[in-house]
């Protein structure tokens, strides 16, 4: 299985670079050449040619600054007008010499002239952000921080200049995806040797733009620190029925969701499960009439299941549904049934469960769950460090944790971490999480035996569900407002497209 993007922390990347550098490999020359090629391609797409383009390089003292200066020199040799603004008391000597020899200009930032420098940056066609690299700690400081603040405040979305981050956007948490202080959001990040976790983890990922990986021949071995699944991965994970399959062999999902007063969650969760291709959905609760009206194939009433979807639309004052959730947890604990635990079921979670239980909170719900386990954290802190707190919840509960958000973060057994950014911003709408819970419940029901054999598989299935959910939203209403039921209705065609593209057909 080959994820669309594997990421490696800074220490592993540096360790992989060391033997090549010791052998004299020209890694900086390779990186700078690839960077300049990417920038030249963008310039040709925007203005038809490289010659005459205005390029501003923000160069720190480290290797990222060297990469940026050498790339600037190559662009200057192709006729671009290149100005490098150095952001430290010293700069990369070889890179500076190459730029000056190619006809570029170089000067240090002037603390008292930040507004003038910001105006030059804003007038450029391209800005190369080479201030901080993977060895930096903390955010931007001093004049460059004030410069970036001024540029970010004045730069219209999607307008010039095009910002290209060199390896990583300066100031992001390279390994954990945090975002400390002001960051110059990039349209494109050209990263070297291997992608870094901060390029896919929120909130830093939103500063990276498109990510292109330049292969430097690094021997990055072992499992990635964070992965993002792609379509081929999901097709490989998706349960496709054999010729002799019957409904029970394909998995049965039990849904405990909604109430008679608020039946919508029951309809949405049941629809998500049924339309994802599970063999059968059993609904348990008081909203059976509404569920049957929307999904006549659902069976209302208790019975044997392989996985549960627990909690969507279950309110704290609904004693009957809460008792049904608790009874379902008996099967999870004693019979090994898998479960998706959402919304109103999170505060009923047993003290300790296995990774075959997948929690699907948003940031506020995760903060409340952690409080039940003695961890005092606010929603805003979860949003600032989602990987940290999703890991904390996994460690405290034993469950696989899918933390919902603009980028969904999944933490599971054996260090498995995924980050998925597949849905449109329109997907932040009521009921969308109920559909996601149903889709994930279908996957767990069909592959529960595999999950018990390989507990880390639950995290991969959760990431796969997030990808299908996001792509279904795009399919349902491209580039416009969407409602949750439309996402559910788009799931079958989304799955079929993924399977068809890889030749994965019913056997």
Image (cartoon, rainbow, N blue to C red):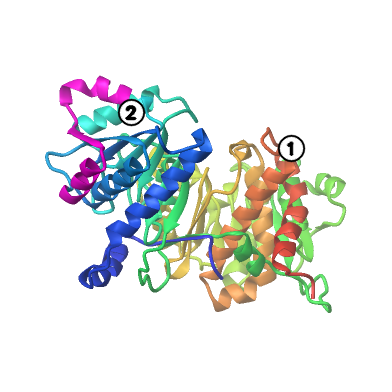
Please give the label number shown on residue 388. none
- 410 part of magenta stretch: no
| In the rendered image, the vertical position of residue 203 relative to residue 329, given as above or below | above
Classed neighbour count for the residue bearing mark 2: other residues with Cα under 10 Å, few (<14), some (14–19), many (≥20): many
Q: Residue at x 60, y 38 (%)?
A: 428
Looking at the rendering, the stretch of residues picked out in magenta corresponds to 93-120
Dot 1 corresponds to which residue?
261
Question: How many numbered marks appear?
Answer: 2
Q: Residue at x 63, y 68 (%)?
A: 237
Asked if labels 1 and 2 touch by Cβ distance under 8 angstroms, the answer is: no
Q: Residue at x 68, y 33 (%)?
A: 480
Q: Position of residue 121 (x, y in %)?
A: 33, 28
Q: Earlier in the sequence, mark 2 or mark 1?
A: 2
Please identify the quadrant where the C terminus is shown: bottom right
Q: Position of residue 426 (x, y in %)?
A: 62, 36
229 left or right, relative to 498? left
Please identify the quadrant where the N terminus is shown: bottom right
Classed neighbour count for the residue bearing mark 1: other residues with Cα under 10 Å, few (<14), some (14–19), many (≥20): few
Q: State the residue in front, 31 or 447.
A: 31
Q: Residue furthest left?
A: 89
Main SS, magenta residues:
helix
Secondary element under disc 1, as helix, strand or loop, is loop
Please give the label number shown on residue 121. 2
Q: Position of residue 386 (x, y in %)?
A: 42, 48
Q: Residue at x 34, y 37 (%)?
A: 183
Secondary element under disc 2, as helix, strand or loop, is helix
């Amino acid at each position: 299985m080959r994820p669309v993007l594997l990421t490696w922390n800074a220490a592993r990347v540096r360790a992989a670079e060391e033997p090549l550098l010791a052998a004299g490999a020209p890694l900086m020359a390779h990186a700078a050449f690839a960077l300049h090629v990417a920038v030249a391609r963008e310039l040709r797409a925007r203005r038809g040619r490289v010659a005459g383009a205005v390029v501003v390089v923000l160069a720190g003292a480290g290797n990222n600054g060297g990469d940026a200066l050498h790339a600037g020199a190559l662009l200057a040799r192709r006729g671009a007008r290149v100005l490098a603004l150095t952001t430290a008391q010293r700069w990369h000597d070889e890179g500076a010499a190459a730029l000056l020899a190619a006809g570029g200009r170089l000067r240090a930032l002037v603390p008292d002239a930040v507004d003038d420098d910001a105006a030059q940056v804003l007038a450029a066609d391209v800005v190369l952000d080479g201030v901080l690299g993977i060895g930096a700690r903390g955010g931007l400081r001093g004049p460059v921080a004030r410069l970036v603040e001024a540029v970010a405040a004045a730069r219209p979305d999607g307008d010039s200049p095009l910002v290209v981050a060199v390896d990583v956007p300066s100031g992001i948490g390279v390994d954990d995806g945090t975002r400390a202080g002001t960051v110059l959001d990039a349209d494109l990040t050209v990263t070297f040797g291997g992608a870094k976790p901060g390029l896919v983890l929120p909130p830093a990922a939103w500063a990276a733009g498109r990510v292109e990986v330049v292969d430097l021949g690094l021997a990055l071995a072992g499992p990635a620190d964070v992965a993002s699944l792609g379509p081929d991965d999901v097709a490989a994970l998706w349960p496709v029925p054999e010729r002799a399959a019957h409904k029970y062999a394909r998995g049965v999902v039990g849904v405990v969701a909604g109430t008679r007063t608020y039946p919508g969650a029951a309809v949405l969760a049941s629809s998500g499960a049924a339309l994802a291709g599970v063999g059968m959905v059993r609904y348990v609760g008081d909203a059976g009439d509404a569920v049957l009206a929307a999904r006549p194939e659902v069976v209302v009433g208790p019975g044997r299941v392989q996985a549960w979807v627990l909690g969507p639309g279950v309110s704290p004052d609904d004693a009957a549904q809460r008792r049904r959730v608790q009874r379902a947890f008996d099967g999870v604990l004693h019979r090994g049934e898998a479960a998706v635990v959402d919304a109103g079921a999170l505060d009923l979670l047993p003290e300790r469960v296995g990774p075959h239980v997948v929690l699907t909170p948003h940031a506020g719900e995760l903060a409340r769950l952690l409080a039940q386990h003695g961890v005092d954290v606010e929603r805003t802190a979860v949003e600032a460090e989602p990987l940290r707190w999703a890991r904390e919840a996994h460690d405290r509960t034993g469950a696989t944790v899918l933390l919902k958000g603009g980028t969904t973060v999944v933490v599971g057994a054996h260090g498995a971490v995924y980050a998925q950014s597949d849905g449109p911003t329109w997907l932040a709408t009521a009921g969308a999480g109920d559909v996601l819970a149903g889709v994930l419940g279908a996957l767990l029901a069909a592959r529960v035996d595999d999950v018990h054999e390989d507990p880390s598989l639950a995290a991969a299935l959760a990431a796969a569900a997030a990808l299908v959910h996001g792509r279904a939203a795009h399919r349902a209403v491209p580039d416009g407002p969407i409602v949750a039921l439309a996402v559910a209705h788009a799931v079958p065609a989304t799955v079929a497209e993924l399977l068809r593209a890889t030749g994965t057909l019913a056997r």
